[in-house]
Amino acid sequence: MHSTDLEFDRDHIWHPYTSTTHPLPVYPVESASGVTLQLTDGRELIDGMSSWWCAIHGYNNARLNSAAHAQIEKMSHVMFGGITHQPAVDLVKKLLALSPPHLQKVFLADSGSVSVEVACKMAFQYQVNRDKPLRQKLLTLRGGYHGDTLGAMSVCDPVTGMHTLFNKVLPQHIFADKPSASFHSNADPQQLLALDAIFEQRHEEIAAVIIEPIVQGAGGMWFYSPDYLRHLRALCDQYGVLLIADEIATGFGRTGKMFACEHAGVDPDIVCLGKAITGGYMTLAATLTSDKVADGICAKGNVMMHGPTFMGNPLACAVACASIDELLANDWQRQVHNIENQLNQELAIYRQSPNVHDVRVLGAVGVVELVAPVDVAKLQSQFVDRGVWIRPFGKNVYLMPPYIIKPEQLSRLCDAISVAL
Ligand code: PMP
């Protein structure tokens, strides 16, 4: 890329969470293939991020490419109001086959945040329609993240989710403590009692609980006890509250299970999927729910009040079908298990560093949590110099590579983390 284009980018284009007056540097990528990003200056970087949980099969995958080409020759988009098409029908069949059997209705949205908005609206409409009009609040967890639209933001962690900035416009929901017990331990009994108390006192206000199952991602890359999730499910059942599982980051095998709820043996009432649904090719998301919830919403002649322009986009649905086929053909469980083993072995060394607070691994996610926040721009350039693409945030330097990564490539990523120390 010409240096004037980089200047143009700096002057005119907003990147995620950046200042226009003091933007962080950006690296121009020319192409990407397998697990490698190629910069315009010819340098090659091993991708440790899967483009934020998405590119589970790596880049430029033959099966996904051919699905995209084949579909674009037929139609890339057509409205979904009053029209249907094979890619949507095929995708929903595949999603239902992967999901718990009670999930039978699927809303195809256009991004993760929108699928969260849809899930919350489903819960509110359901409660109103069953004559519980006061149940218009959500219960969620501190340390959570569910997207950047206003509704989704209102259930993000109140501190890191910028609630102070948007205080006057965000709806006020109910927050329980971040689950303190880690993935391999039992939940803290005090925290379970605190949940009991919230439900006992406020259940008549609560439409649904919304959580990221097991892995709290952007809120801190924290893996919590399945016990906590099971307890939430039991309370939801007891008090007629819906459970929304935001599997946007965790879905499609990333944590070692197809969906993270499976770690706890919990079946949610509503599930949000996104990110890896298209293998990272383009934006698409889905909100799945049960007949019970869908029929409740649509009772008394009501309809689900949402219908985005790009709902069920055929191109995205066709690629999503190919991505699910690729996942199943690739023996993803073995791939993720091998990555997990290697991350456990090769990140363990960092536990000895005084700069490291914790090292944790779950499925194909490895996290080195430092004692202090990193200087992102500086560290990023050191990683690029070492030929890897790792994008830390806050105190967390983490890896979530494409499932197809080779052991020697993963070793390069694990080794590179030493520069952060
Ligand atoms: N929920 C979770 C758990 C996420 O990680 C994200 C994306 N980081 C979202 C929702 C929002 O998805 P999108 O960025 O596609 O709107």
Image: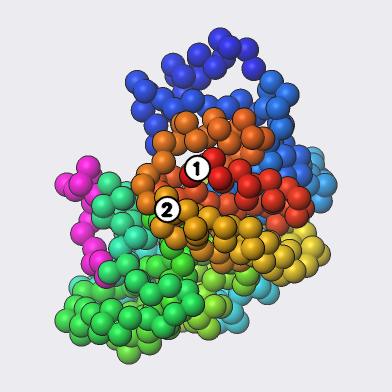
Give the mark nearer the N terminus: 2 vs 1: 2
Indicate yes or no: mark 1 CB to ligand 1 under 8 Å. no
In percent of width and height, residue 388 lies at 64, 39
Q: Residue at x 41, y 25 (%)?
A: 23
- Report the side of 164 relative to 141 (left or right): left
Amino acid type assigned to the residue bearing label 2 in the image: Pro
Question: Is 167 covered by the magenta stretch?
Answer: yes
Direction top: furthest residue: 4
- Left or right, residue 194 beside residue 329: left
Q: Position of residue 418 (x, y in %)?
A: 56, 45
The residue sitting at 54% across, 30% down in the picture is 381
Which residue lies at the image location 76% right of the left edge and 40% below the top edge?
A: 33
The image position of residue 296, as x and y in percent, is 40, 78
Residue labelled with disc 2: 354
Label 1 amino acid? Ala
**Mark 2: few, some, or many residues within 10 Å (few <14, many ≥20)?**
few
The residue located at (58%, 52%) in the rendering is 399
Q: Is residue 146 above or below residue 65?
A: below
Q: Label 1 belongs to which residue? A: 420
Q: Can I make out residue 293 in this image?
A: no
Q: Which residues are magenta?
A: 163-176
Looking at the magenta stretch, what is its main secondary structure? loop
